[in-house]
Image (cartoon, coloured by chain):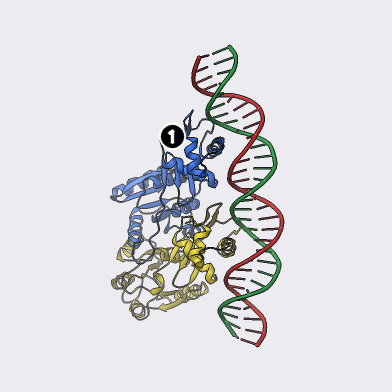
Chain colours: A blue, B yellow, C red, D green
Amino acid sequence: MTAVLVIEDDDRIRLALLLALEDEGYDALGAATAEEGLRVQRRNPANYVLVDLMLPGLDGFECIRQLRRDDDVPIVVVSARDDTHDIVAALEAGADDYVVKPVAIKELTARLRALRRRARTGGAGHAPELVPVLVVGELEISPDGGEVRRAGQPVPVTRTEFRLLCELAEHAGRVLSRQQLLERVWGYDSGDERLVDVHVGRLRQKIEQDPANPRHLVTLRGLGYKLQR
Amino acid sequence: MTAVLVIEDDDRIRLALLLALEDEGYDALGAATAEEGLRVQRRNPANYVLVDLMLPGLDGFECIRQLRRDDDVPIVVVSARDDTHDIVAALEAGADDYVVKPVAIKELTARLRALRRRARTGGAGHAPELVPVLVVGELEISPDGGEVRRAGQPVPVTRTEFRLLCELAEHAGRVLSRQQLLERVWGYDSGDERLVDVHVGRLRQKIEQDPANPRHLVTLRGLGYKLQR
DNA sequence: CTGATTTGTCACGGAACTGTCACAGATCCG
DNA sequence: CGGATCTGTGACAGTTCCGTGACAAATCAG
């Protein structure tokens, strides 16, 4: 089944698009904001993404850039604005096509089919490398990408914090003692275990919504820390 | 050089398009009829074809079908008719995009670049320049051509910078340590890692819009550098 | 051959990070 | 309840890390 993700804040338009696409035999998903769309696409990637430009919060251009950062999915902008500037900017941001609302559903699907013909194939071209990602609840950690995100938003962490988080994430759900963490993250055979506390605290400030009541990076008194999903 | 073939019977429009495309740095060829266009493309294949629908003799739809029969060149229809029926028919015939006259040249070239990113690899008779292009965000890198473009505009880079960029682009999304870069780009087993910094800095001056706040070539403190998609 | 470009080295200053400490809460246990 | 233990956190200084301008050697183009 071919899936299409529609990112559009206007409920009426989104619904109309979803219904029309389903009529055409597509499996259609909707998202009302860029953030939601990005999350959905990361979790459950569709074959195509339709995106509006005027979105509350993160706008369409930024949405396109973020989608493109780790996904080669064909992106079609469906916008009310018929302005060269917007069109060029959207295409430069990584969109594959740009259509102006209102658009005939037949045209839209014809454009999707045209895009599918061009969908990047393995071929002689360079197949983009997949960067592995550990997912723990709303956290996404890519050890190779040196990147941490919460709910799709990048979170800046230091190297030590990053290593600590990777270590915890690799054993998500298991308790790691301060001693184990000192060894694995710092390479210390012995040392002040308070060091771990401090870094855990700093990490919490960054990755927890409410650092005083951690949901993911929890303390097990007398035992150590664990990262839970 | 990137070549574009314009098949359009109206002399004024064809000339205007050719001049505008040349201004944008393309090598532009014209043909007044479908027959002539097909002949030209067979002899001397362009990288893109723009085609009008209303042509004397063989019409645009047929022209597209015949082009497609033995060529994977990206085809953009440039037509005065804004009609769902025509759009769908043209796309079904094998066109990749459809724009309505009059069209801003900036939009047209942006659409060409978007198509280049999707250019099919392999296939018969495709223009040679299209094959190996690494695309990272708004950057396009042809490892064979030794050419880098940002938003379609050629960027002059030195050989070392180019190798560095290719290395980073091949592993886009992954962090590469200074050590890895020294090895892969310079072939040094050991050496001053500051060398990498300097070249990264120089590269940023060229490929980043705001080199002080890089969007693509980012530093991961303590880890190395990576090229963001 | 000569001037221009590219490349590698160095040093410096500022920014970011790390580890330590002290202290205040929190939790446990008798 | 009260002491003992464990944990969270703010402050701080030393260290590391990074960006950059300057400059000389090497290379290239004409």
Residue behind mark 1: A175
Vertical comparison of B41 with B143: above or below: below
Look at the numbered disc 1 and give the secondary structure of its residue.
loop
All told, the count of numbered labels is 1
Q: Position of residue B103 (x, y in %)?
A: 47, 65
| Between A47 and B14, the one nearer to me in the picture | A47
Q: Residue lying furthest front in this view?
A: A189
| Between A3 and A22, the one nearer to me in the picture | A3
Using the image, name the chain to which the residue with label 1 belongs: A
Q: Where is residue B54 in the image (x, y as percent from the top left)?
A: 36, 71
Residue beneath the point at 40% across and 70% down: B130
Residue B163 visible here: yes
Q: Where is residue B113 in the image (x, y as percent from the top left)?
A: 45, 65
Q: Position of residue B210 (x, y in %)?
A: 59, 58
Vertical comparison of B83 with A38: above or below: below
* Three-letter code for the amino acid on which mark 1 is drawn: Val
| Between A125 and D4, the one nearer to me in the picture | D4
- Residue B37, quarter of the rendered image: bottom left
Would you say B207 lies left or right of A101 here? right
Disc 1 packing (10 Å; few <14; some 14–19; many ≥20): some
Residue B103 visible here: no
